[in-house]
Image: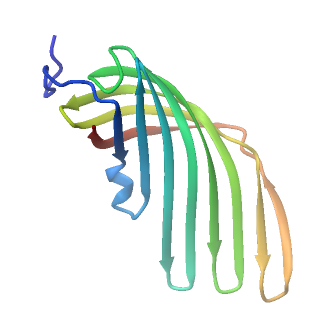
């Protein structure tokens, strides 16, 4: 049985690099490196964003990894189910205040991977939880520092969509 638009003669590759085209439109670099091991795929992930609007600058840096099981084999047309974890560092600085937040996100994802020879894409859903984190706010005009704990006792959902090339 062939999958819609997929190449039935596509061969599984061992490595791949994917990026999220939707967030790239906003200047966010969200890159995944796939390493195929049988039906498993190990995926180191990097996230970076730097936006400056007027006197406010926002920086986002993250790294982590994922492990997913592909039911028909790694880096071929297949349903997948996996888990991920990542750390995020967010810094927002304005003319007189700076806010910094470091946190960890863990969760799961499920979806489908389509492969056309060396081009591939995935579409799925994620469910994740953010660890309770400390927000550090520094006011440069008064030389004061305020530390607040941000409660995060809930789950978040998202879309897992990336396109890339395998080799």
Q: Residue at x 13, y 28 (%)?
A: 5
Of residues 91 and 142, which is closer to you in this image?
A: 91
| Quarter of the figure with residue 140 | bottom right
166 w.r.t. 19: above or below: above
Instruction: Please provide percent x and percent y for residue 11.
Output: 21, 24
Of residues 145 and 165, which is closer to you in this image?
A: 165
Residue farthest to the top, as pictured: 1
| Quarter of the figure with residue 112 | top left
Of residues 145 and 10, which is closer to you in this image?
A: 10
88 vs 39, left or right, is right
| Quarter of the figure with residue 78 | top left
Image mark count: 0
Of residues 7 and 102, which is closer to you in this image?
A: 7
Q: Residue at x 42, y 33 (%)?
A: 35
Instruction: Please provide percent x and percent y for residue 70.
Output: 39, 19
Q: Residue at x 67, y 45 (%)?
A: 104
166 w.r.t. 49: above or below: above
Image quadrant for the N terminus? top left
48 vs 20, left or right, is right
Q: Residue at x 28, y 23 (%)?
A: 76
128 w.r.t. 79: above or below: below
37 w.r.t. 123: above or below: above
Instruction: Please provide percent x and percent y for residue 108.
Output: 54, 29
């Amino acid at each position: 049985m062939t999958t819609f638009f997929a190449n039935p003669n596509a061969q599984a590759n061992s490595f791949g690099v994917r990026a999220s085209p939707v967030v790239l439109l906003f200047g966010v670099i969200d890159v995944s490196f796939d390493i195929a091991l049988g039906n498993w795929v190990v995926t180191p992930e990097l996230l970076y964003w730097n936006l400056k609007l007027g006197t406010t600058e926002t920086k986002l840096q993250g790294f982590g990894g994922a492990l997913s099981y592909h039911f028909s084999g790694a880096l071929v047309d297949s349903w997948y189910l996996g888990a991920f974890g990542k750390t995020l560092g967010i810094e927002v600085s304005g003319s007189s205040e700076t806010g910094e937040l470091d946190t960890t996100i863990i969760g799961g994802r499920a979806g489908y991977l389509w492969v056309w020879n060396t081009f591939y894409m995935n579409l799925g859903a994620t469910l994740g939880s953010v660890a309770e984190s400390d927000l550090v706010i520094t006011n440069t005009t008064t030389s004061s520092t305020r530390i607040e704990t941000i409660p995060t006792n809930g789950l978040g959902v998202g879309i897992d969509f990336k396109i890339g090339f395998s080799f």
